[in-house]
Amino acid sequence: MLKLKSKDEINTMKEAGAVAAAIRDKLIDFIKPGITTLELDKKAEKLISSANARAAFKGYQGYPANINVSLNEEVVHGIPSSHRVISEGDIVSIDLGVIYKGYYSDTAATVGVGVVSPRAELLIDVTRDALYKGIEVTTEGNTLFDIAFAIESYAKFYGFSVITQLVGHGIGKSLHEDPQVPNYVSEYLKKITLKAGLVLAIEPMIAMGSGDVVTASDNWTVITRDRSLSAHFEHTVAILPGETMILTL
């Protein structure tokens, strides 16, 4: 069942989104060769605490860290580690959520470290642009199919593949609410009409290779089966009468 939010709830979620966005951007600025993914997690913990927020991911279904840090072929859910050192040429995806005033916000971004290959840079750019293509059609009266088509067709145009085993989601007082928001087309998505008051976490995950994924031995980290590079971008978005508001800019 879709949980539509009131104007006051969306205003509070906008505050939560601003907190998450500020932390995301500070973490991106902190990324450089030689630091570990655990250092990023510790930085995130301090930033979240100083914003009077809580980490949405820590403890969620047993997840042990504050954020996800996924490198190269890791799509999502990379657990920060003191043994995982970021190197020149890596691409790094940061995924974080916060709880602020009782509401969740969720955001992600991928960046290249130093000089990356032209194809990796294109993958990052296409994934970011695919997110905005999806947001452009996230309007009252459209359907989930419109979002999925915008994202998938854009990725395929450049020869990339969307990850089909992972999807976006509704969000509010819970991290994951209905509906699921796939990045690939399916006929049933035409049945779910977007309504004012709906808040979605839209998050294209796009691979350079086939898009098939497996879960690593830590039971969390999702990696591409063919070990091709993957990128991930995410915004929390609210649908309002006559407009769409990105809460995590």
Image: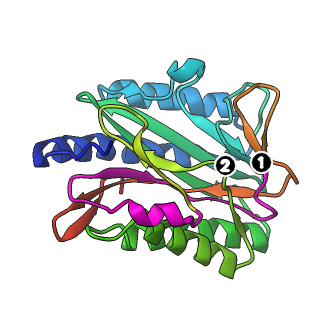
Q: Is residue 30 toward the left or the right of residue 55 in the image?
A: right
Q: Residue 180 location, x and y as percent?
A: 47, 48
Amino acid identity at mark 2: Gln
Residue 16: quarter of image: top left
* The image quarter in which residue 31 lies: top right
Helix, strand or loop at mark 2: loop
Tag shown at residue 165: 2
Is 55 drawn above or below residue 73 in the view shown? above
In the displayed structure, would residue 204 be above or below residue 150?
A: above
Nearer to us in this view, 9 or 83: 9
Label whose residue precedes the other's in the sequence (1 or 2): 2
Residue placed farthest to the bottom in the image?
A: 157
Q: Image height check: is 231 above or below 97?
A: below
- Residue 3, image x, y percentages: 27, 42
Q: Residue at x 55, y 21 (%)?
A: 61
**Is disc 2 surrounded by few (<14), some (14 to 19) or many (20+) residues within 10 Å?**
some
Looking at the image, which residue is at 67% across and 49% down? 165
Q: Residue at left 56%, top 61%?
A: 183
Point out the stretch of residues depicted in magenta.
184-213
Residue 66: say if magenta. Answer: no
Q: Is residue 118 left or right of residue 170?
A: right
Q: Position of residue 65 (x, y in %)?
A: 58, 24
Q: Are marks 1 and 2 in contact (CB under 8 Å)?
A: yes
Q: Quadrant of the N terminus?
A: top left
- Label annotation for residue 213: 1
Indicate the position of residue 197 as horizontal and vertical percent values.
Answer: 21, 52
Query: Is 195 within the magenta?
Result: yes
* Amino acid on which the number 1 mark rests in the picture: Val
